[in-house]
Each structure stands twice: as structure tokens, then as C-alpha cells.
Amino acid sequence: MKVLIVEDEDKIASFIVKGLSAVGYETERVATGGEAIERAPGADVMVLDLGLPDLDGIEVLRRIRARDLEPQVIVLTARAELGDRVQGLELGADDYLVKPFAFEELLARIRARVRTIEQVERRHLRADAISMDLLERTVSVDGRRVELSARQFELLEVLLRSGGAVLTREQLLEQVWGLSFDPGTNVVDVYIGYLRKKIGAERIETIRNRGYRLTVDRAGSAEDPTARADVPS
């Protein structure tokens, strides 16, 4: 997990960076709103000061959310007025901490944001343009909702979890249909055909005399702990 600290006061920034690094977080510090917007896509959590030299932090937050960037944002500021807090939260801040602050409280809030990220990751499987929500049992491809039957959903889930590895017909029969032997049916091939029509034929490759694989550059399992960087608890 990477924490981006957006703070123009060197002493405060150094204090936060040292503290987070000491407990194992990857950190990056920037001092301007422009840099914050540029670096936001690579951050999991952003600690955002509002009093920046080039852009107000509220404007930075507005632009980040307008671009559909999804770091968890903790606003850190000397502005204690209710109106400022409400505005920040309405624009997409996930938490709000007023200066002066205790590092332990900031750390607790960052850990809470990390837990939120982990919950979302466990709920979703993604590979390139394919996204699967395991809780809602929905699938989208290239941002477009795709309707799958229950069995088609299970087959795609197994392919996504494989990370692009080749799966034999026997493996698919066992994992999707619960069959420990091949009864001589072509059901796997039929359902692969259904999936190809719905997600794109080019996304499932036939490996001759072996089986099938999802042709993606990157596939992530919602349950694979190695798919994410270790984070402190």
C-alpha cells in the first residue's frame, strides 16, 4: 500500500513520512496540488493538506474525483470549521483530521482506509477490462455490463482466478460442475462458446490438446494475498 502525503510544510511532511515508513508503509511526499493530481493514480491512500501554495486542497480533491481516481483521501488541515469539513466530505474525502494532530490518530485513520481498500479488493476480481463483483454477482467488460447465467459466472470466475494459466477441461469440469471425471460431455466447450460471445472471443484462447486460458496481461484473485503488497495491521 502506498501513502501519498500532500503537504507543503517540510517539518510536518517529514514527521508523517518518518512515522509511516517506520511502521512499514511505502510513502511519497509532494508539496503542491499539481503534483498531487499527477501522483494520485499511483496512490492507495492520500493525506491531503488544504493549504497548498498553488491550488487549494479542496480544488485538488475536486479534480481527483472528477477524473474518477480512487485513492482513499484523508484531509489534514488547520481548518476546523464545520463548513470546510462538510465541503471536503461532500467532494469525496473519506476522512477529515484537524491540525494539530497526534500521529497515532493519523495512523489509525490510515489503517481504517487500508481495511476499506482490502474489503473492496476481496470483493472484486479484475483482469484488464473485465471486472467481476463477487457480492453483487455482476460482470462488466470495457465498462459495459454483461449479463451471465449462474454457470457462466462461475466459469468466468475460475478463469479469472487462474491468472492466465491454462486450465484443462477436466479441471473446469471439477471446479465449475463438481465432476471428478469426464463423462464425455462437451459442456465445457459449449459454455466457453457462450462466454466468448459475451466477453469477446479473443479473450479466451484454446490451447490445443490442453484446454483454455484467459488471454489477459494481468489477472488478480480476490483471495490471493500475494496479489497485494503486505500492509501493517
Image (cartoon, rainbow, N blue to C red):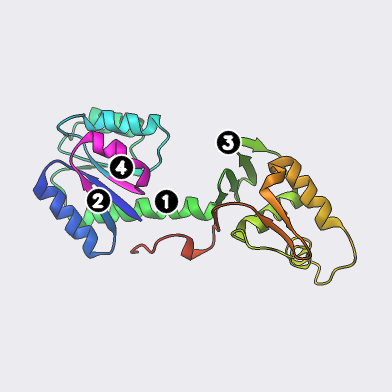
**Which residue in the rendered view is the most extreme toward the bottom?**
180
**Which residue in the rendered view is the most extreme toward the right?**
184
Q: Please report whichever mark, 1 or 3, sits nearer to the chain's N-terminal start.
A: 1
Instruction: Give left or right: position of 109 versus 143.
Output: left
Would you say residue 169 sits in the magenta stretch? no
Q: Please report whichever mark, 4 or 3, sits nearer to the chain's N-terminal start.
A: 4
Would you say residue 40 sits in the magenta stretch? yes
Q: Secondary structure at mark 4?
A: helix
Instruction: Give left or right: position of 83 versus 112.
Output: left
What's the CA distance linking mark 4 and mark 1? 21 Å
What's the CA distance linking mark 2 and mark 4? 9 Å
- Which residue does the numbered mark 4 point to in the structure image? 39
As drawn, 177 above or below 110 = below
Q: Nearer the viewer, mark 1 or mark 3?
A: 3
What's the CA distance linking mark 2 and mark 3? 31 Å
- Which residue does the numbered mark 2 point to in the structure image? 28
Q: What type is the residue that disc 4 sits on?
A: Arg
Tell me if label 2 and label 4 are in contact, CB under 8 Å.
yes
The N terminus: image quadrant: bottom left
As drawn, 136 above or below 221 = above
Residue drawn at x 14%, y 32% as measured from the top left: 53
Q: Residues within 10 Å of mark 2 (few under 14, many from 20)?
A: some
